[in-house]
Amino acid sequence: MSKYADLLNLPDAQGHFGPYGGRFVSETLSHALEQLEEQYTRLSADPAFQAEFDKDLAQYVGRPSPLYHAERWSNHLGGAQIWLKREDLNHTGAHKVNNTVGQALLAKYSGKQRIIAETGAGQHGVATATVAARLGLKCQVYMGAEDVKRQAPNVYRMKLLGAEVISVESGSKTLKDAMNEAMRDWVTNVDDTFYIIGTVAGPHPYPLLVRNFNAVAGREAREQALQQIGRLPDALIACIGGGSNALGLFHPFITDDEVEMYGIEAGGEGIESGRHAAPLNAGRPGVLHGNRTYLMEDDAGQITPTHSISAGLDYPGVGPEHANLKDVGRVKYELATDAEVMEAFADLCKYEGIIPALESSHALAFAKRLAPTLGKDKHLIVNLSGRGDKDIMTVAKMQGITL
Ligand SMILES: *Cc1c(COP(=O)(O)O)cnc(C)c1O
């Protein structure tokens, strides 16, 4: 029996993963979250709801996504075989749509007519606007004013999809402030509004339901590995922003003790520089956005600014389940610096003809380090969480090229 069997029972009834998670919110919100939890528990046991979710994943998202053997890159690195779980091939180009399709279905079944979301780089905002358009629901997306400026193409995408983007002027005018505003909106409008959170963070039950909606990737990968490799992989690797693509891949393997797992945080310019987004490697436990988890904060308990080359990893917290997986030692949390990420990005373009997202390139950067230390008979699965078309301007700028 697996020594990690207990992890399958988490979160507990209060939403705790060990000492992390929970529901640190006002009474109004607490009531709304209880309703959501009750609805989710009921629907996740309802075959009709599951069938509709599966149909949407197949026909709208385009699942299953392939498990692809990156043979030429593996040969070049001269060690373990690298396999890519191709979440970049999903509709809208990343894993995020798995979750927004699931939560939009919850919204539909609850009869709520309005959807809100927070977004940082705009990827979750676009994935939410997409599903809202499909269901004909009104959609408003909170986005920090700084991000609205930096991510103009995604702001325009959301508008094309019929969503309204609300620019947030408070605090550092970035993702954490957008999330605060979205929660404030939800408290006031909870009767007709469904709040779609974009990662495995926030108060219970969000970390649970976002993980479960994303776990389709891990279930597929497990089956594909058994068929294509003939056994389970030796290790799984995924990047960590809030941690949803990683948990989606990891969770269905959690009691396969022989499968190692690596979550890769944004090392930015290096831990010593202070310019990174690595709460699990360099932060400490605290409370943010309704849950207890590892955070980047200063001695006075103030959240410190984050930095990453990839906007999607630029978050000062991390999902509470990861905090627990770190403490119990089931997952190892490592770093990739901006410079390593650029090299891995270039490798995948050159050796495989795939332009990866800069977020996903963190996982690739670690695979590039790990693979040569292992034999050719070892197998690694890397979650290719998204495609990199959105990032070519950033890469060009890093290379000193003006487009
Ligand atoms: C948003 C995003 C991430 C980071 O979010 P997680 O919740 O950590 O998965 C990673 N990759 C891509 C492509 C993204 O858009």
Image: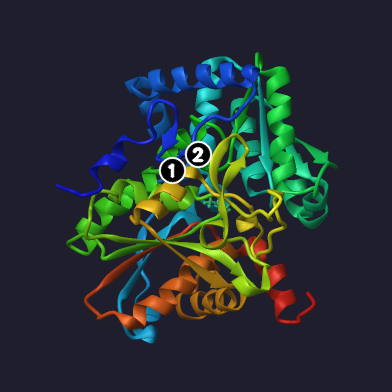
Q: Which residue appears farthest toward the front when viewing the image?
A: 299
Give the percent coordinates (x, y) of residue 119: 68, 44
Q: Position of residue 106 (x, y in %)?
A: 51, 24
234 or 213: which is nearer to us? Answer: 234
Say whether residue 180 is left or right of residue 10: right
Residue at 26% x, 63% y is: 233
Three-letter amino acid code at disc 2? Asn
* Residue 162 at least partly seen: no
How far apart are the two marked residues, 2 and 1, measured between alpha carbons?
6 Å
Horizontal and vertical percent position of residue 17: 41, 39
- Identify whether 355 is placed above or below 36: below
Determine which residue is flagged by label 2: 99
Q: Which mark is residue 118?
A: none
Badge 1 residue CB within 8 Å of ligand 1? yes
Marks 2/1 in contact by CB < 8 Å: the verdict is yes
Q: Disc 1 marks which residue?
A: 214
Residue under the point 50% across and 39% down: 99
Label 2 packing within 10 angstroms: few (<14), some (14-19), many (20+): many
Query: Disc 2 on helix, strand or loop?
Result: helix
Residue 96 at x, y percent in the picture: 53, 46
The mark nearer the N terminus, 2 or 1, is 2
